[in-house]
Amino acid sequence: MSLMTDVTIDPPQTSPWPRRLFHWRVVLILLDVLIGSTIIGVQAREWFWDYTQIARFRYDINRNYSFGRQAVEEGYLNVYDNQLITNPPEAKKINYTPLRLALFAAWAKWNSWTQENPETWQESHEFNGFLMYYNTSIEWLAAIAALLLVRHWIWRTGPPARPGMTRIDKLLHGCFRGILAFLLVWFNPALFASAHGWPSTDMWVIPFFLWTVLLACWNHWFLAGMVMGIGAMFKGQQLFVVPVFLLWPIFAGEFGKALRWACGFAFMSALILSGWLLSYPADNDVSTPDRILDWPALLWVTTAAAGVLIINGWRVLPKRWRWTWVPVALFGIWLIVRPSLADFSIWTWLLIAVSLAVTAAAIWLPLRQQWYSLGGVVAITLMLCIVYFHGTTGWWELGFMYGTERHPNMVVGPGNNLPALLAERFGWRNPKEVMMTLDMPGWLVSSSDGSPATIDIQIRHFLLVVYGLFMAISCIAIARQWRRNDRRFLVAIIVPWLLLYSIPAQMHERYLLYGSTAAAIVIGSSVGLTFLNLFLVALTFLQTVHCMMITNRLTRSMAHPTLNGDLAWFCERIRPDISWAVLAATAVFFFAAFTRSRCAAPAQKQMAADEPVDPSAADQSQQ
């Protein structure tokens, strides 16, 4: 018999009032668990900050605060451009995405108001309170998303059709496993170590990913894309799973949802980047924080948005006058493509294609869906300000791309994955080592002298291709379980994160946190896989604290009840062969993503199960 069920236990009374009182007592108990665990979790995080003080990764947090101070002093929008001009040494070169830099700037600004000496980083929890409470809030949002996601998929299989079932029965159905998912995220020791011991910013990935999945499951694809756009601007690692939200609906045969998600993602990303796209530095003097607003670029973006509204103007015309809409629509198309007319290029064809797509959408799609095309056009025109106007690209070169070149190692830190095995057991330590050379056809790629060109395939490129292949296959599993209405969806949606840590090179040891923490949602599908994930959580914790001890050079002499030489010796002894266990666990999740569970239901059953039940009729049937 299963130890965990989602069946609501009714009291023995047959009268409705005692049953309702019983149900409300259960609701109050569940709320008490949520509120009480939240308070205990906040206190535990403050205790963990002090407990791990001896192994704090001070280099990282000092670096974070110094870049926040730099953004306050030089101007937030000027940091990337100034660094491209001055080209500082690697230790002072920024590799932070835009919203990550914005948060550190807000932290530095907050401390300038609340601290006596805000110029340099300090150890106290009060000095770091802004960042620590933000991390706590982010973790709580991740736990809430896990609860709602598990509960949603338990509901999708259909609540138990039982005589006398009331609305409170439906409310309670799925809450028990959902609360367990909440607790697994909220009290995750690896999350404690990463967010409040290190402290790093890796936990920022998890809530945006889970909320994106949840909103997509609720059929809010445009909003889901916007949430993922925000997450990608906080942590560039989110970009590795962006293809999942495009391939998943495409493989499910729902192309419109993929397009809506892409419009939401592009719109929010471009909106966040608009400060760099619609302005440029006043001069090459880095001491000048002023920037110039690019008025022609702003005018083009706004008139292009107006062009979308103009193209949709035929809806307000009487039927006999709709033929007059054609020249008006051509005017709207001209508003979109006009900056490219002076210099005809490939971008001109892109704008023409966008204009034709907007016109087709205006003719065939309902009015409520025109906002998606408006968001897409605003995003594309904002990004093309780099081509046609003075938009700067420092946010991409330093915020996203520089991080991929900063650590040229097979695995960064004491990680345990396939690259770690290749480095430690097979001697492939350089991810840029050439594995093979391919001769490309002359019609495809040619050298300057016209001879056929060759392409060198590096180890990191090969591993990235392998990851992309398995990630695409896992998207088939996601779409398949989505179509089946099977709870195995909760397993399939986690697989891309586990693959990301297991296969590609240049992965930090902390990146296992993404998959192991988000995998708390598999409690809604399989208790066995949940126990397997606890192994990954424990390994994530060990890798994180091991890296903290190595950095402080205290792996042998550290006098601490937990973070001491014995723990460091254990972590060193299991490397890298425990990578085989990580690969095996990833393979188990990968194959489980394609299997059926006993908790599946067609969509029509879900819709029927969600219909309200008349309590009076149910009581009569019981009598």
Image: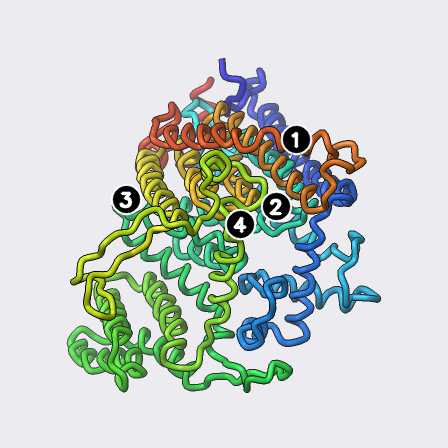
Q: Earlier in the sequence, mark 3 or mark 2?
A: 2
Q: What residue type is labelled 2?
A: Glu
Q: Which amino acid does label 1 sit on?
A: Ile
The circle on residue 205 is: 4
Residue placed at 54% from the left, 58% from the top? 234
Q: Please tell me whether mark 4 sits on a helix, a strand or a loop.
A: helix
Answer whether labels 3 and 2 touch (C-beta < 8 Å).
Answer: no
**Whole-Å distance between the Cαs marked 3 and 4?**
25 Å
Residue placed at 38% from the left, 43% from the top? 467
Q: What residue type is labelled 3?
A: Phe
Horizontal arrangement in the rendering, residue 568 relative to residue 213 (left or right): right
**Whole-Å distance between the Cαs marked 3 and 2?**
31 Å
The circle on residue 139 is: 2
Which residue is label 1 attached to?
A: 29
User: Is residue 604 in view?
Assistant: no
Q: Which of marks 4 and 2 is nearer the N terminus?
A: 2
Q: Please tell me whether mark 1 sits on a helix, a strand or a loop.
A: helix
Which residue is label 3 attached to?
A: 251
Name the one closer to the observer, 438 or 18. 438
Q: Earlier in the sequence, mark 2 or mark 1?
A: 1
Q: Earlier in the sequence, mark 3 or mark 4?
A: 4
Q: Nearer the viewer, mark 3 or mark 4?
A: 4
**Whole-Å distance between the Cαs marked 2 and 1?**
23 Å
**Whole-Å distance between the Cαs marked 1 and 3?**
42 Å
Horizontal arrangement in the rendering, residue 134 relative to residue 47 (left or right): left
Q: Which of marks 1 and 3 is in front?
A: 3
